[in-house]
Amino acid sequence: MRRADLTPYAMLKACLFAAALLPAVSHAVAGGASKSACPDAAGMRTVETGMDLPQLMQQRQIPGISVAVIEDYKIVCAKGYGVTQKDGRDPVTPSTLFLAGSISKPVAAVGALYLVQQGKLSLDEDVNLKLKSWKVPDNGFTAQHRVTLGLLLDHTGGFTGGDFFPGYAVGEPLPSLPQILDGLPPANNDPMRVGFVPGTRWQYSGDGYLVIQQLMIDAAGKTFPELMRTAVFERLGMRDTTYAQPLTAERAASAASGTAMNGSPVKGGWHNNPEMAAGGLWSTPSDLARLAIELALSAKGNANHVLSQATVRNMLTPHWESGVVNILGTKDDPDGMGYGFFVGKRNGRFGHIGGNVGYQATLLMFGDAGNGVVIMTNSDVGLAAGNALLDQIAKVHGWNYVAPPLP
């Protein structure tokens, strides 16, 4: 199987359209709202009374949703709805793990920028100077401008593929990262090559983030999961987050199983994604909320447990605006591209969406006020309900925000 041709945004739009055509299933969503850590229980009840989330989940055949709401740089509610697998009985809790899809990219970007701060990487030098296990092949495009880490981070590095990685079914052999980069068996993707002059236009590319993954491994001399654990996750108390592929048995016991667009369970529970930096992150809304809070506070100079104030401000500044797909922006404040995150010019807004086979998620943060939300689901069409939940949370909390139509 080759890499999907649809962009993640076109794929998401198609999924939501198809989900709207699905008939309501006859059974109710098992469990409803489950175990939570929700100091602002009253506020969340107001959110819930303004929408029928269980009915929406039932109609879209979404087994489970987990959410973390951020107010004033604090998690004021972490709550689960539904169950961890279709027709299951185990409730989703704030500690249930979900695949984060392309939210993996900005998280990986934090790790890459940490290595820049450590002097192990540079934003502006030719990545081939630090790559050891694999090199970006030279061609006519790289002859005009070399590929740099900074260009890869904001999707202007010249790579054109990797819109969506389907991963590998449980039990299938997993390729090494160099095999993925060169499109060699057992990898299920094409070779990853520069397809335009780096720095001349924007094109969303998971391929570029796999080059970043290899660059980080070679520069740090550690596996990618170990590097991210020590550089980022341990520093921020993100105990339920890992790039490990496949999951350990202990982690797998806490993971939600994926669900296809038609409501059928993903065989084996999920696919393994060795394309870690592009889409292989397992996490929870609470852990991703901790990261969002850290970045928002660091931009003000008030945290900086991983990145300096200057580095975070650079990360969350629009580096490219022309042609950037609008994912979380509004008509008055469309998305630009920072390092890893889609960013706005108002309210310190940054965020990303993500999708794996059987999962969808979104992260949205308004850094200036310290408000935001992370929603994770175990369904190919999870954001059909997730975006409705986001809009209702924003309405109740007075954020003056409505999620944009999908492109």
Image (cartoon, rainbow, N blue to C red):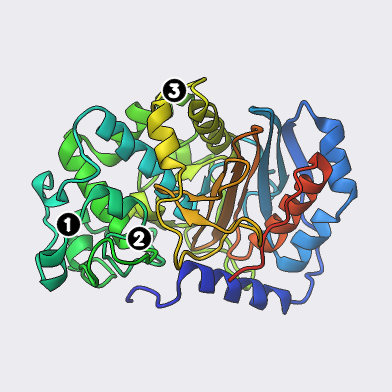
Would you say the residues marked 3 and 2 are in contact, meaning their CB atoms lie under 8 Å apart?
Answer: no
Relative to the observer, which residue lies in front, 17 or 152?
Answer: 152
- Residue 227 in sight here: yes
The disc label shown at residue 304, or none: 3
Task: Check disc 3 and give the amino acid type.
Answer: Asn
Give the number of the mark in front: 1 or 3: 3
| Badge 3: residue crowd in 10 Å (few <14, some 14–19, many ≥20) | some
- Residue 248 in sight here: no
What's the residue at 65%, 60% (across, down)?
383
Q: Is residue 231 above or below residue 186?
A: above
Question: Which quadrant is the C terminus positioned in?
Answer: bottom right
Whichever of callouts 1 and 3 sits on the residue coming sooner in the sequence is 1
Q: CA distance from mark 1 to mark 2?
A: 15 Å
Residue at label 2? 206
Q: Is residue 324 left or right of residue 17?
A: left
Residue at label 1? 178
Secondary element under disc 2, as helix, strand or loop, is helix
Which of the 4 image quadrants contains residue 91? Answer: top right
Q: CA distance from mark 3 to mark 2?
A: 28 Å
